[in-house]
Image: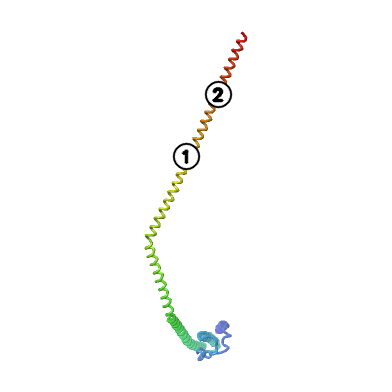
Amino acid sequence: MLAAACALTSIALAPHLALAQTPIDATTAVKAQPLDAASSASADDALRADYARRQKILDRRTEENDYSYGVKAHDCYSTFFVNHCLNKARDQMRTTRQEIRADQLALDDEQRAERARSRDQQAALKQAQLDADAPQRAASEQANQQSFDEKQRRNALAAAQRQADAPQRAANQAAYDRKQADYQKQLDDARARGVQDAQEREQKAERYDQKQRDAATHRAEIEARQQEKAQQAQQEQQRQEQLKQQQQDQ
């Protein structure tokens, strides 16, 4: 059973075999380093980079502590006092974990303080910018107010002018309406005269046609009487000739 436990521990530790090649000094590894004055990065960028570097060290210390505990626990199974060895390795692992935890808390506190400082600084800069822009804003607001007041004044003057011009506009409108009414009456009268003239022309044309028809009828009657008289004269002539012929025959 001891051999099986050792084998299982070896398999579990296999992914961490490359992590413990270079030991890290736990007393100095996560201390803040001075910023390089010649660096082109800003102070905030350098500080964030330092926080990232220190966090990476803490993460590596955690991995190495876990790896070291796994190695020691694995080696304990080859000793006579296995449980005593495991307890000792566990205590060492917990002690180191507490140290790492303390450094992690300290780093977290520094980052929170830095974020608070950055927020305060940004708020102060924003307030300073607002204070610096206050005269310009006041001038702009005054100009806007003056523009608004001038617009209101112009509107009031325009309203007063419209009110003053209202009687003249009413008179002009009345005159325009009368002119339009007169024009409409002229149009109506012209249309009425046109209708009347058309009716009169139709009546004249009808009377002319009737006269033409009457004249034609009269001419026809005259011609008929003339023809009738001509026939009667011809008949009378024929009768006279017959009588004369009869007299000669006797």
Residue 40 seen in render: yes
Q: Which residue bears the numbered disc 2?
A: 226
Location of residue 82 in the rendering, given as x and y in whole percent from the top left corner: 52, 87
Seen as rendered, the residue at the extreme right is: 249
Q: Quadrant of residue 136?
A: bottom left
Location of residue 127 in the rendering, given as x and y in whole percent from the top left corner: 43, 81
Q: CA distance from mark 2 to mark 1?
A: 38 Å
**Mark toward the start of the polypeptide (2 vs 1):** 1
Mark linked to residue 200: 1
Mark 2: few/some/many CA within 10 Å (<14, 14-19, 20+): few
Q: Is residue 160 above or below residue 66?
A: above
Q: Which quadrant is home to the N terminus?
A: bottom right
Q: Which quadrant is home to the C terminus?
A: top right
Q: How many marks?
A: 2
Q: Quadrant of residue 12?
A: bottom right
Please state which of residues 33 and 242 is positioned toward the viewer in this rendering.
242
* Horizontal arrangement in the rendering, residue 16 relative to residue 113 (left or right): right
Please state which of residues 79 and 160 is positioned toward the viewer in this rendering.
160
Give amino acid for label 1.
Glu
Q: Secondary structure at mark 2?
A: helix
Give amino acid for label 2.
Gln
Mark linked to residue 139: none
Residue 66 seen in render: no
Going 57% across and 86% down the picture, which residue do you hit?
19
Location of residue 120 in the rendering, given as x and y in whole percent from the top left corner: 44, 83
